[in-house]
């Protein structure tokens, strides 16, 4: 199993970041790697709903919401479909986003942990793409939090 982990700190209260992350249907509003997002079998906070994302590379990927905890500020999902004829085969992809309040700071702050586990025949390609999507997401969240 391949693991990709990234994290970023934000100088906002954890609940402000969590409101953006937990909105399973809103990834296109804060991640510039995502052009469009729609929910199927929703609403977007129902475990089992599908998020269909069109990415900047033209690929369409479908995620199933597998976990959502407001108490833990944790969102989990799996990729259940990828673009037909994709050059890279991805298997058993699951991911988690976790918002952690940083209580040792004078000002409100938090950390977002984003990690994914998957199998593929092209690990370097998929690790690089996951890191690219995560980094774009972190920067997009920063922009969304200041507006």
Image (spheres, rainbow, N blue to C red):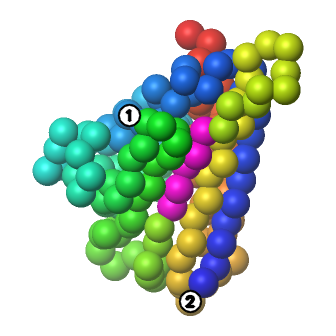
Secondary-structure class at tag 2: loop
The magenta segment is: 95-99
Q: Residues within 10 Å of mark 2 (few under 14, many from 20)?
A: few
Residue 96 location in percent, x, y? 53, 56
> In percent of the image, x 80 and y 13: which residue is there?
107
Quarter placement of the N terminus: bottom right
Residue visible at 67% across and 66% down in the picture:
4
Residue at point 26%, 40% (across, down)? 44
Q: Position of residue 5 (x, y in %)?
A: 69, 60
Query: Toward which corner of the image does residue 69 lie, by quadrant?
Result: top left
Any magenta on residue 102?
A: no
Q: Which mark is residue 121?
A: 2
Q: In the rendered image, which quarter is residue 8 located in?
A: top right
Mark 1, residues whose alpha carbon is within 10 Å: few (<14), some, or many (≥20)?
Answer: few
**Does 120 appear above or below 39?**
below
Identify the residue under disc 1.
Answer: 23
Nearer to me, 32 or 92: 92
Give SS at disc 1: loop
Q: Is residue 75 left or right of residue 5?
A: left
Magenta stretch: includes residue 96:
yes
Q: Earlier in the sequence, mark 2 or mark 1?
A: 1
The count of marks equals 2
Q: Quadrant of the C terminus?
A: top right
């Amino acid at each position: 199993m391949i693991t990709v982990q990234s994290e970023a700190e934000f100088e906002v209260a954890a609940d402000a970041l969590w409101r953006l992350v937990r909105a399973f249907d809103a990834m296109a509003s804060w991640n510039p790697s995502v052009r469009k997002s729609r929910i199927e079998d929703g609403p977007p906070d129902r475990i089992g709903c599908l998020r269909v994302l069109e990415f900047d590379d033209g690929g369409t990927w479908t995620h199933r919401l597998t976990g959502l905890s407001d108490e833990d500020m944790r969102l989990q999902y799996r990729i259940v479909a990828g673009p037909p004829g994709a050059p890279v085969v991805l298997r058993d992809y699951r991911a988690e986003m976790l918002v952690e309040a940083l209580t040792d700071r004078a000002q409100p702050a938090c950390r977002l942990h984003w990690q994914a586990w998957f199998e593929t025949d092209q690990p370097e390609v998929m690790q690089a793409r996951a890191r690219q999507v995560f980094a774009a997401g972190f920067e997009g969240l920063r922009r969304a939090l200041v507006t």
